[in-house]
Amino acid sequence: MEHADLTSPMEELGGKSLGETLLTPTRIYVKAILALLKGGIDVHAISHITGGGFYENVPRMMSEGLSSKIKLDSFPRLPIFDLIQ
């Protein structure tokens, strides 16, 4: 997307511009996590996943001998990622 228009609304981004979408802050989950902890949920690990974090952070938070399976289709992929890919 070299020389992309950063200001025009884009249908695939829900009517937001590319610039607005790229500058949207990361969702912060502090309140949701605090609610879990206050609700008595026994949380054993939390990991903030960014970039290559799936491959680095997920194994780091697990005990030796455990493995994980991440189903990529089990959560929504934001349209911006399809667009910039």
Image (cartoon, rainbow, N blue to C red):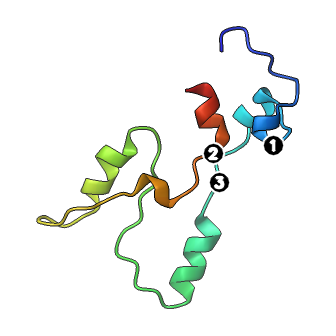
Decide: few, some or many residues near mark 1? Use Cα within 10 Å; few <14, some 14-19, many ≥20: few
Q: Residue at x 65, y 54 (%)?
A: 27
| Residue extending furthest toward the top | 3
Q: Secondary structure at mark 2?
A: loop
| Residue extending furthest toward the bottom | 40
Residue 67: in sight, yes or no?
A: yes
Left or right placement of residue 3 versus residue 83 in this view:
right
Among numbered discs 3 and 1, the one appearing first in the sequence: 1
Whether pointer 3 and pointer 1 mark residues with C-beta atoms closer than 8 Å, the reply is no
Q: Residue at x 36, y 69 (%)?
A: 45
Spatial CA distance of label 3 from label 1 is 17 Å
Among numbered discs 1 and 2, the one appearing first in the sequence: 1
Which amino acid, by three-letter code, is at mark 3? Arg
Among numbered discs 3 and 2, the one appearing first in the sequence: 3
Residue 23: in sight, yes or no?
A: no
Q: Secondary structure at mark 3?
A: loop
Q: Which mark is residue 78?
A: 2
Left or right placement of residue 53 versus residue 38 in this view:
left
Q: Quadrant of residue 60?
A: bottom left
Q: Quickly name the residue at label 1.
A: 14
Mark nearest the camera among 3 and 1 is 1
* Quarter the N terminus occupies: top right
Which amino acid, by three-letter code, is at mark 2? Leu
Left or right placement of residue 39 versus residue 55 in this view:
right
Q: Quickly name the residue at label 3.
A: 27
Q: Nearer the viewer, residue 31 or 70?
A: 70
Up/down of 49 relative to 37, above or below: above
Q: Quadrant of residue 70?
A: bottom left
Q: Secondary structure at mark 1?
A: loop
Which amino acid, by three-letter code, is at mark 1? Gly
